[in-house]
Image (tube, coloured by chain):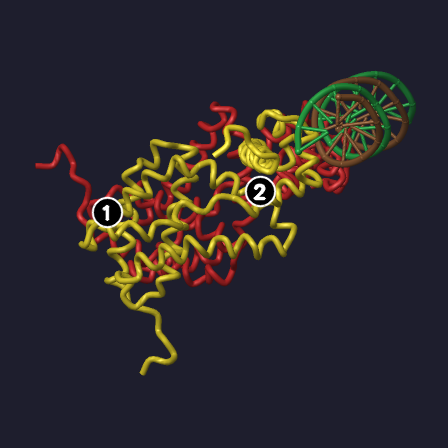
Chain colours: A yellow, B red, C green, D brown
Amino acid sequence: MPLRLSRSQAKARTRKRLLTAAGEVFAEQGFAGASVDEIASRAGHTVGAVYSHFTGKDDLFLALFDEHAAHPLDGVGEIPSQCEDDETAFAAFGDYLAGVADRHTAWSTLEMEFLRYALTRPELLDRLAARWWAPRTAVARLVAPRCAAHDPAAVATAIIGLFEGLVTQRRVDRAAVPSELFAEALRWLMAGLARTPGRARADTP
Amino acid sequence: MPLRLSRSQAKARTRKRLLTAAGEVFAEQGFAGASVDEIASRAGHTVGAVYSHFTGKDDLFLALFDEHAAHPLDGVGEIPSQCEDDETAFAAFGDYLAGVADRHTAWSTLEMEFLRYALTRPELLDRLAARWWAPRTAVARLVAPRCAAHDPAAVATAIIGLFEGLVTQRRVDRAAVPSELFAEALRWLMAGLARTPGRARADTP
DNA sequence: GTCTATAGCCGGATAGAC
DNA sequence: GTCTATCCGGCTATAGAC
């Protein structure tokens, strides 16, 4: 491979740097609070570079929206392959949540900003909803064997909600949400599934 | 009581209207996106009124922070008094969460904005953390009898996290989070408490 | 494709009339 | 105490050099 980058490689690299910087600044300052100039300079460029890659601030934000990294819980399906036993698998899952929690902070902040932006643009809400299906599906697949009569998708939604809700509280008060609580709360939820009657189904005799 | 308002009453009324309008606009647009002019006109006034009551935009935001309405879950302690049985009490709690969920949207959005604002001002984070203790305590008191060996405060944290996380997901995708899920997930969590060993305590033989 | 310089606008804050 | 008019700084976006 060449030591010097080709034109298209250099261009792609600049674009990537701009998007990365944009993700940081939008997460820290919000869409309205972020300035194109700060994004550019944090990427090691000037505004001109931004406007050569994107038509404006909105376009940059939308591009970031589209290319935003996947949810940390998307890859959760690979956990149980490492251990056969269900109990240890869920313990591993709980530890995984606790480990991801703090790193997850930036992701969730930016996603909150996407949410605000999308709230006044219904067609974007749909795209956000579509993106949020991936982690739900991954978690649902993981927990399906232990969902008893319950809908795995509903259980996954609850787990993700619990996770995100704990992450938010932890940002405000680390002491109130010790990292062990992620695994502990998950255990409570999973243990309760077996003890609880499933939904009544119309097609069940 | 007089038909005409006294000077101080009129002043207080103006202040209240400004704060209410500020709450709406800050929630919709974020701190940076909100304009003082829009806040004033939505309150039926002009910028002059704002600067006679507050020293600036920041001061207005901080005043709103201090006087922000209590968390909907603060008053949750009054629920069980209406029914003796534990099961029906928690069913009532679940229904309460579902009922509050959609109305809660504006509250949680504004609180998210407080969070962002506070993230770069550590002393504010403490005040936010202090405010979030009230609902935790109220919920902890309610669920304490059913927490088995677990810390009621931790259980309350999990319940509130679950609630907030579901509310957020519901804003993006109502179909993914049907209102029954609030009560259902709560039931899973509570049922799991009894089935799960409590924390090892150093002072327990 | 990227930089520099600048146009043009918007919004926070102030001054003075009432 | 509130309104109107205005100043001023910062920001988006564009034009033109390289």
Crowding at dot 1, Cα within 10 Å, few <14 / some 14-19 / many 20+, comes out as some
| Direction from residue A6 to residue D16 in the image, left or right | right
Q: Which residue is situated farthest in the bottom direction here?
A: A205
Name the foreground residue: B70 vs A50. A50
| Direction from residue B98 to residue B37 in the image, left or right | right
The percent position of residue B119, horizontal first and vertical second, equals 50, 29
Question: Of the residues shown, which amino acid type is indicated by label 1?
Answer: Ala
**In the picture, residue B40 is in which quadrant?**
top right
Image mark for residue A64? 2
User: Which residue is labeled 1 in the image?
Assistant: A91
> Residue B202, relative to residue B160: is it above or below?
above
Using the image, name the chain to which the residue with label 2 belongs.
A
Question: Is residue B77 shown to the viewer in this render?
Answer: no
> Residue B141, relative to residue B178: is it above or below?
above
Image mark for residue B67? none
Label 1: which secondary element? helix
The percent position of residue A108, horizontal first and vertical second, equals 47, 41
Name the foreground residue: A3 vs B29. A3
The percent position of residue A9, horizontal first and vertical second, equals 56, 36
Residue at the location (76% across, 39% down)? B41
Residue at the location (17% across, 48% down)? B197
Quadrant position of the C terminus of chain A in the picture: bottom left
Question: Of the residues shown, which amino acid type is indicated by label 2?
Answer: Leu
| Direction from residue A37 to residue A83 in the image, left or right | left
> Residue B23, relative to residue A134: is it above or below?
above
The percent position of residue A203, horizontal first and vertical second, equals 37, 80
**In the picture, residue A35 is in which quadrant?**
top right
Residue at the location (52% across, 26% down)? B120
Determine contact: label 1, label 2, CB under 8 Å.
no
Name the foreground residue: A10 vs B145. A10
Question: Is residue B124 shown to the viewer in this render?
Answer: yes
